[in-house]
Amino acid sequence: MTHDVVLLAADTVYRTSTTEAVTFWVLGTLAVLGAVAVVAAPKAVYSAIFLALTMIVLAVLYIAQDALFLGVVQIVVYTGAVMMLFLFVLMLIGVDSADSLVETIRGQRFAAIGAGAAFGILIIAGVGNVSATGFTGLAQANAGGNVDGLAALIFVRYLWAFELTSALLITATVAAMVLTHRERIDRRKTQRELATERFAPGGHPTPMPNPGVYARHNAVDVAARLPDGSDAATSVSGILPPRTMASKNGAAS
């Protein structure tokens, strides 16, 4: 009879409800599609947006598994801080499509494919091991509280794995710095040399005027006015056709 009670309790703990199954398959499908879109997106900004979507879906999965602390941290730290910062940087500095086709380190594409395949095999092996040996129920895992249970796992049971992950993240940061490094052909000019060039004939000792300064229309394609009343052609970007005050007044009339 004792054995039957244990089996009944185990069956109650390990049984997956229909709602949990539907939630997992729907969110899991969205997470996989978002991860594929991160790699297949034609622009880096789109990849960042799809990655943020994938992280939000993972946070919902954590919350659905009663891991409230992990879900909140996933949204606040990764999606709200890291990914938004990464997205803002991309929008400010931009990424040229030609830069993505140049390999700073030879063979990095093949290394990335190999690392991704190895990581996939590791995940499949881990899921298969859990499916064969069984897993701990949510009630037992969160018996002392979700935060306490998470702290015990990270800083006691899986301390070495946590430290190795930290080292991996630091390595990834250094690798990103190496990949974005640009070789300097000429030596860096000193402040004295830069000042000499600015005061040389043809240079500009003072800062360049912004478009629209001292003009009737503050627009980026309207040249600034010099002290003699003429237009400062260098105040308008070279990719924009400058508009003079005469042409603008004629268009207005």
Image (cartoon, rainbow, N blue to C red):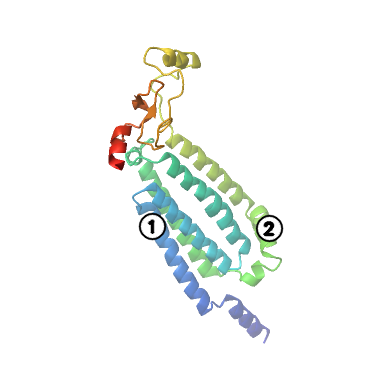
The residue most toward the front is: 253
Query: Does residue 187 lie above or below 126 as drawn?
Result: above
Question: Would residue 162 be found to the left or right of residue 91 on screen?
Answer: right
Count every numbered label the image shows and give the total.
Answer: 2
Question: Would residue 36 be found to the left or right of residue 168 on screen?
Answer: left
Instruction: Name the one closer to the observer, 133 or 117.
Output: 117
Q: Residue at x 64, y 51 (%)?
A: 159
Quarter of the rendering occupied by the C terminus: top left
Q: Residue at x 31, y 37 (%)?
A: 249
Q: x, y percentage for residue 124?
A: 45, 61
- Measured in 3D between alpha carbons, the distance from the residue under mark 1 to the one under mark 2, in whole angstroms, is 34 Å
Q: x, y percentage for residue 93?
A: 43, 39
Mark 1 and mark 2 residues within 8 Å of each other at the beta carbon = no
Within 10 Å of disc 2 (Cα), the crowding (few <14, some 14-19, many 20+) is few
Q: x, y percentage for residue 19?
A: 51, 77
Q: Secondary structure at mark 2?
A: helix
Whichever of callouts 1 and 2 sits on the residue coming sooner in the sequence is: 1
- What amino acid is at disc 2? Ala
- What amino acid is at disc 1? Val
Circle number at residue 36: 1
Instruction: Name the one closer to the observer, 111 or 180.
Output: 180
Circle number at residue 152: 2
Instruction: Name the one closer to the observer, 190 or 194.
Output: 194
Q: x, y percentage for residue 200?
A: 40, 12
